[in-house]
Image: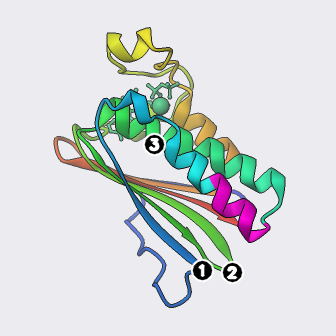
Amino acid sequence: MKEKVVNGSESCVQSAKTALIRQIYRVQAMDFASAGEISGKIKNILKQLGVNGEMIRRAAIASYEAEMNLVIHSWGGSLIFVVTPEEIQIITQDTGPGIPDIDLAMQEGYSTASDQARELGFGAGMGLPNIQRCSDRVEISSKEGQGTTLKISFFL
Ligand SMILES: Nc1ncnc2c1ncn2[C@@H]1O[C@H](COP(=O)(O)OP(=O)(O)OP(=O)(O)O)[C@@H](O)[C@H]1O
Ligand SMILES: [Mg+2]
């Protein structure tokens, strides 16, 4: 079942007790050199856990898009990767300008990416729609001028 929850109340990160994996990665604003490293690490961990290839592919796409949104749009933050027996969670928390209109940001083609990001090939406005498409549940909460929390879930 696919659920879409935008503007959802920020739900709790799975408690350490039931989590099989819980990793926190720092993401620096404008750090294009490290782009994609985190999704590579997540891919390897999921492979080692024996998660099926299609699920790994979906989680890798979502984590890459989420990571890049922190690089491009935020002032920095963290990506938290959690695996429990029931689900994979990818959560980003950042400080930054926030997303004033989440429904608009979820639309294909909407982007406020800088010229620098566009020169590097980002800014098609496809990241959030892709995350939505390849995951089972997306929750976004954001405060303008403060930051954004994005929680992506994949049901195992
Ligand atoms: N973490 C964030 N902080 C602030 N704004 C964000 C964040 N993530 C997304 N946004 C806003 O939502 C818009 C749409 O995001 P989306 O990922 O779909 O596209 P994009 O990042 O602009 O381009 P692409 O992902 O195709 O390179 C962004 O242009 C930006 O305005
Ligand atoms: Mg993006």
Residue type at numbered disc 1:
Leu
> Which of 9 and 21 lies nearest the eye of the viewer?
21
Could you give the CA–CA distance between mark 1 and mark 3, rounded to whole angstroms?
22 Å
- Residue tagged 1: 20
Residue type at numbered disc 2:
Pro
How far across and how far down the image is residue 144, in percent? 21, 42
Residue 86 visible to the viewer: yes
Q: Residues within 10 Å of mark 2 (few under 14, many from 20)?
A: few
Residue at the image position 46 percent from the left and 85 percent from the top: 16
**Left-right relation of 63 to 55:** left
- Whether residues under marks 2 and 1 lie with C-beta atoms below 8 angstroms apart, the answer is yes
Q: Quadrant of ligand 1?
A: top left
Residue type at numbered disc 3:
Glu
Task: Tell which residue pokes out farthest to the left in this image.
Answer: 145
Q: Quadrant of residue 112?
A: top left
Q: Tell me where the magenta segment starts and ends, as one range.
A: 43-50
User: Which numbered dot is residue 132?
Assistant: none
- Whether residues under marks 1 and 3 lie with C-beta atoms below 8 angstroms apart, the answer is no
> Which of 143 and 155 lies nearest the eye of the viewer?
155
**Left-right relation of 16 to 29:** right
Q: Secondary structure at mark 1?
A: loop
Overall secondary structure of the magenta stretch? helix
- Residue tagged 2: 85
- Residue tagged 3: 67
Residue at the image position 57 percent from the left and 53 percent from the top: 41
Q: Quadrant of residue 19?
A: bottom right
Could you give the CA–CA distance between mark 2 and mark 1, rounded to whole angstroms?
7 Å
Residue at the image position 62 percent from the left and 78 percent from the top: 84
Q: Secondary structure at mark 2?
A: loop
